[in-house]
Amino acid sequence: MASSEVKPKSISRAKKWSEEIENLYRFQQAGYRDEIEYKQVKQVAMVDRWPETGYVKKLQRRDNTFYYYNKQRECDDKEVHKVKIYAY
């Protein structure tokens, strides 16, 4: 596992859907806490996003396989409570 420079100070669960929650859902599906951890582990400057919505388009998992996401919302209301929000 890669060494993390930035560690979260606290964690909470999402209560309702938002664009931020949608992107966190996508990062966590791919095995990362959030965009900060993804950039640290993968050593990338930018994340591929859909220009229309701003949602994450493509993520590379730790095993180097890719997750591709749709332009539309993918985090259903029943999945929202599973999303973790990290505070730094």
Image: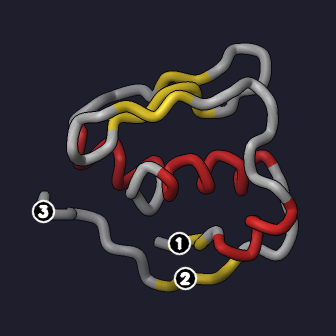
**On screen, residue 48 above or below 82:** above
Relative to 51, 45 lies left or right: left
Q: Amino acid at mark 1?
A: Tyr
Q: Residue at x 50, y 58 (%)?
A: 28
Q: Considering only order in the chain, which callout, 2 or 3, is on the residue closer to the N terminus?
A: 3
Q: Residue at x 64, y 46 (%)?
A: 23
Residues at circles 2 and 1 in contact by the CB criterion of under 8 Å:
yes
Dot 3 alpha-carbon crowd within 10 angstroms: few under 14, some 14 to 19, many 20 or more:
few
Q: Residue at x 48, y 55 (%)?
A: 34
Residues at circles 3 and 2 in contact by the CB criterion of under 8 Å:
no
Secondary structure of the residue carrying numbered label 3? loop
Dot 1 alpha-carbon crowd within 10 angstroms: few under 14, some 14 to 19, many 20 or more:
some
Residue 16 location (% of width, % of height):
87, 68
Marks 2 and 1, how far apart at CA: 5 Å
Question: Residue 4: which quarter of the image?
Answer: bottom left
Q: Residue at x 29, y 65 (%)?
A: 6
**On screen, residue 70 above or below 74:** above
Q: Which mark is residue 86?
A: 1
Secondary structure of the residue carrying numbered label 1? strand
Looking at the picture, tell me which residue is in the foreground, 36 or 79.
79
- Circle 2 residue: 11
For the N terminus, give its image quadrant.
Answer: bottom left
Q: Amino acid at mark 3?
A: Met
Q: Which mark is residue 43?
A: none
Residue 18 location (% of width, % of height):
83, 53
Mark 1 or mark 3, which is nearer to you?
A: 3
Q: Considering only order in the chain, which callout, 3 or 1, is on the residue closer to the N terminus?
A: 3
Q: Which mark is residue 1?
A: 3
Q: Amino acid at mark 2?
A: Ile
Marks 3 and 2, how far apart at CA: 21 Å
